[in-house]
């Protein structure tokens, strides 16, 4: 319930006018009832005709003299246009994650402006083949060679694309107009939808589901038919047929005249994935993602609204495609951190999908081989319904995993980054012409440079991070792009022993070439995938056997099956355990499990070697034994003891400022405000990266078992900051953050 005397209303949400609001008085009868996101009727324009509008804010601040404001006529209930749901969703996101209503609206409206339909011109002959031939003969006689060229084609083809004629046949528009006025041809244009899916494939039927799969299908669809709407979590090992289940569920939804949204991580939106959906559902499948042009996005939304699409596939933003009859949302690889937005509103696709499913009366299906702690926790509390897929329908077992203690390697005199066992196994693979993947479990991709004499670390002058060493003596800041050359001597103590800490993928590639002369290596990291398509190209090259080894960061462990890969080496598994946030253990477990899933996808069994300095850590032990359940039990205990999500909720408040002192003062002010509440407050403190691009960063964390208490804190902080007037400081909220600041 929001108190306030005025309502800011948008009348036209057709795209570009979203920012334009009109203020109305709230009549006594609606005071305290009217809230953001509601659809209302208001008098509009000269004749005061009633029009539909949406409340984007309720406020006590009048923008015009009171007597000039008109009054809201009433609330619209009953069946509302598709857009009404988008507005309600935006209002919910604003309340739940913190942002302005306008920014939230921009997030949920996938199209920013309406686009003209695309037109295709064609020419049609108006004469029959015989008559055309005689006109052609006449043109040849008169040496009208351009006209002759097009007529020659038209004899056999009654219709030709306009571009072909003006392009390849090189016939001028004037010549065509002349033919048109002679009554020989007609030039027409027809509009069509831009379709980003450019595939052609035979339709394929689904497989016969095995018992585990069939159980999911049966339950989800019968719940649906009984009017029950739930969230389901499918926990299934890689290759257990989760995607096959989604396809089968979608088929069931289509039979019920319902539409589906399928979210997959951006990086998994590949040709193969799309093809699989296309083979089942043909042209009624489309995609939505950031690489689409504005026109393509607009047209996909139009197709969705008109019911011409059954399925849309895409990353988190595909949630906002406006389907009038949404029946189901699927979130594959539900644990992926890319489902959380990194900009305001910092929404999580899982929670947002839950809210949206509620609005649309749809079901929600989550799937993962390594479910997020959030999802599994809710399943264990009975809020989600859990299904487990333990078998691979195609046969084939999971790879065998062993752990290598790197401390022992060192003790026994092996200083290489490759353990002796790994070297042996790689040698074997080279002999047998099988492939190996080497995975560096690390988010950055190169080492830092430090002085061995005084310990000085080379840092970016604009950001509070160390510079990363690249080939050719360059040092680069991965946050702002600052670049400099590596000094010959230490800037602090002039010692010449200023060296790189070699652990990046480039260095691994170098070491490989030294250890195995003639080895063919492909490398995949932030450096080699900067160009468009390079990601796909590297994977395709590796897949076609152009290299013996693929070295890379975590991007190589996602998706993609390489049947010839029989060995996966994780070089330093605990690197991701050193991340200073509470999700480090979970992230490590997920990455290692995924990496292990890459080995032995073909006929031959796979082997996985996990090298680590902390072989006793439960994330490493449990991923080696491939026991999610055991990992979960330990991890959830730790979350409970430490007071972390999902056991409690948490909000990070990030304060940024170009002035260190002012940022600090604002953070202190906010902290004082929060101390009045009875909740756990951590901070304020400098963020772990205290400065990026010369902007200082401070952070506060609040914890509470009740999410509502935290949104209350957010409202209070927003009000306080707004009350201070315009400032250079800005604040952001991040609920149940994926990464620490
Ligand atoms: P996941 O999404 O869990 O990794 P997929 O759905 O991609 O698993 O299935 C893995 C492989 O098994 C695919 O090649 C798929 O075609 C095949 N598959 C899935 N379900 C069945 C089934 N019921 N019968 C035969 N093959 C199946
Ligand atoms: Zn030094
Ligand atoms: Zn920098």
Image (spheres, rainbow, N blue to C red):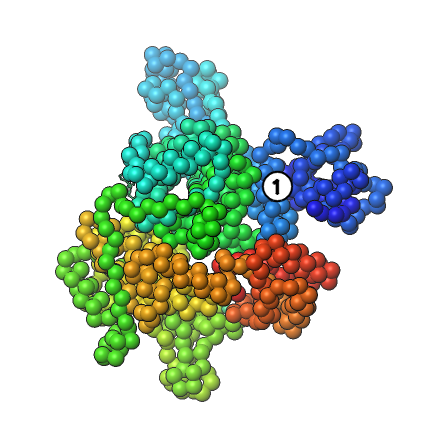
Q: Which residue is drawn at 46% across and 73% down?
A: 466
Residue found at the far right of this picture: 67
* Front in this rendered view, residue 152 or 194: 194
Q: What percent of the width, then of the height, locates residue 488?
A: 39, 81
Q: What percent of the width, then of the height, locates residue 184?
A: 43, 16
Residue 27 as seen in the image, left or right of residue 394: right
Q: How crowded is mark 1: few (under 14 residues within 10 Å), some or many (20 or more)?
A: many
Q: Residue at x 31, y 31 (%)?
A: 205
* Front in this rendered view, residue 307 or 531: 307
* Front in this rendered view, residue 350 or 276: 350
From what the image shows, is residue 493 above or below residue 81?
A: below
Q: Residue at x 41, y 79 (%)?
A: 450
Q: What percent of the width, then of the height, locates residue 95?
A: 62, 50
Helix, strand, or loop for circle 1?
A: helix
Q: Which residue is drawn at 29% across and 54% down?
A: 597
Q: Does the residue labelled 1 lie within 8 Å of ligand 1?
A: no
Residue found at the far front of this picture: 381
Residue 661 as seen in the image, left or right of residue 190: right
Work out whether residue 310 can be spotted: no
Q: What percent of the width, then of the height, locates residue 593?
A: 33, 57
Residue 13 as seen in the image, left or right of residue 509: right
Residue found at the far left of this picture: 431
From what the image shows, is residue 56 above or below residue 421?
A: above
* Front in this rendered view, residue 147 or 130: 130
Q: Residue tagged by mark 1?
A: 87
**Which picture quadrant has residue 42?**
top right
**Count of labels shown?**
1
Work out whether residue 485 can be spotted: yes
């Amino acid at each position: 319930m929001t108190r306030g005397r005025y309502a800011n209303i948008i009348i036209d949400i057709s795209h570009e006018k979203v920012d334009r609001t009109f203020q109305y008085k709230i009549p006594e009868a609606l005071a305290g009832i009217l809230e953001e996101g509601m659809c209302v009727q208001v008098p509009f324009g000269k004749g005061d005709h009633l029009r539909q509008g949406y409340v984007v804010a309720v406020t006590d601040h009048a923008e015009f003299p009171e007597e000039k404001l008109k009054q809201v006529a009433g609330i619209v209930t009953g069946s509302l246009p598709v857009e009404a749901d988008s507005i309600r969703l935006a209002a919910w996101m604003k309340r739940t994650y913190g942002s302005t209503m306008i920014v939230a609206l921009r997030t949920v409206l996938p199209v920013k402006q309406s686009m003209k339909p695309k037109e295709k011109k064609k020419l049609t002959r108006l004469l029959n083949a015989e008559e055309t031939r005689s006109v052609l003969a006449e043109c040849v006689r008169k040496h009208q060679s351009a006209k002759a060229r097009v007529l020659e084609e038209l004899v056999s083809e009654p219709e030709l694309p306009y571009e072909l004629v003006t392009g390849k046949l090189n016939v001028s528009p004037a010549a065509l107009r002349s033919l048109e006025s002679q009554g020989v041809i007609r030039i027409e244009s027809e509009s069509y939808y831009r379709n980003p899916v450019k595939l052609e494939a035979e339709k394929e039927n689904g497989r016969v589901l095995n018992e585990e799969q069939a159980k999911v299908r049966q339950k989800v669809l019968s719940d649906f038919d009984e009017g029950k709407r739930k969230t389901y979590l499918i926990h299934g090992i890689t290759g257990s047929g989760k995607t096959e289940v989604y396809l089968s569920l979608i088929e069931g939804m289509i039979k019920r005249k319902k539409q589906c949204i399928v979210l997959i991580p951006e990086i998994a939106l590949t040709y193969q994935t799309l093809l699989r959906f296309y083979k089942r559902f043909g042209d009624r499948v489309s995609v939505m993602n950031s690489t689409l042009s504005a026109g393509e996005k607009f047209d996909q939304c139009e197709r969705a609204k008109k019911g011409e699409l059954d399925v849309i596939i895409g990353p988190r933003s595909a949630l906002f495609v406006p389907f009038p009859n949404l029946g189901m949302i699927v979130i594959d690889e539900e644990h992926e951190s890319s489902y959380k937005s990194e900009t305001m509103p910092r929404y999580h696709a899982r929670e947002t999908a839950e809210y949206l499913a509620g609005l649309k009366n749809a079901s929600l299906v989550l799937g993962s081989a390594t479910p997020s702690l959030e999802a599994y926790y809710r399943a264990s509390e009975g809020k989600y319904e859990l299904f487990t897929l333990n078998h691979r329908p195609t046969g084939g077992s999971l790879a065998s995993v062993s752990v290598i203690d790197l401390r022992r390697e060192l003790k026994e005199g092996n200083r290489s980054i490759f353990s002796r066992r790994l070297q042996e196994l790689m040698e074997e693979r080279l002999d047998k012409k099988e492939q190996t993947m080497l995975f560096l479990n690390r988010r950055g991709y190169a080492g830092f440079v430090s002085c061995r004499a005084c310990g000085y670390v080379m840092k970016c002058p604009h950001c509070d991070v160390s510079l990363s060493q690249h080939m050719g003596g360059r040092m680069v800041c991965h946050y702002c792009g600052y670049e400099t050359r590596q000094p010959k001597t230490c800037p602090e103590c002039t010692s010449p022993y200023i060296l790189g800490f070699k652990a990046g993928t480039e260095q691994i590639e170098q070491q490989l070439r030294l250890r195995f002369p003639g080895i063919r290596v492909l490398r995949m990291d932030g450096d080699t995938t900067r160009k468009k398509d390079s990601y796909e190209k590297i994977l395709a090259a590796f897949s076609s056997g152009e290299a013996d080894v693929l070295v890379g960061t975590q991007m190589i462990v996602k998706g993609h099956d390489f049947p010839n890969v029989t060995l996966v080496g994780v070089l330093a598994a605990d690197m991701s355990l050193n991340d200073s946030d509470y999700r480090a253990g979970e992230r490590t477990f997920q990455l290692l499990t995924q990496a292990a899933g890459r080995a032995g996808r073909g006929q031959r069994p796979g082997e996985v070697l996990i090298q680590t300095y902390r072989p006793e850590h439960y994330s490493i032990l449990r991923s080696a034994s491939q026991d999610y359940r055991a990992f979960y039990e330990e991890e959830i205990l730790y979350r409970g003891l430490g007071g972390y999500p999902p056991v409690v909720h948490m909000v990070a408040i990030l304060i940024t400022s170009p002035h260190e002192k002012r940022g600090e003062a604002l953070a202190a002010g906010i902290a004082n405000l929060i101390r009045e509440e009875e909740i756990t407050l951590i901070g304020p403190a400098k963020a772990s990266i205290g400065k990026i691009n010369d902007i200082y960063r401070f952070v506060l964390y609040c914890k509470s078992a009740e999410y509502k208490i935290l949104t209350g804190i957010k409202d209070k902080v927003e009000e306080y900051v707004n009350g201070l007037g315009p400032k250079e400081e800005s604040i952001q909220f991040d609920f149940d953050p994926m990464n620490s600041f």
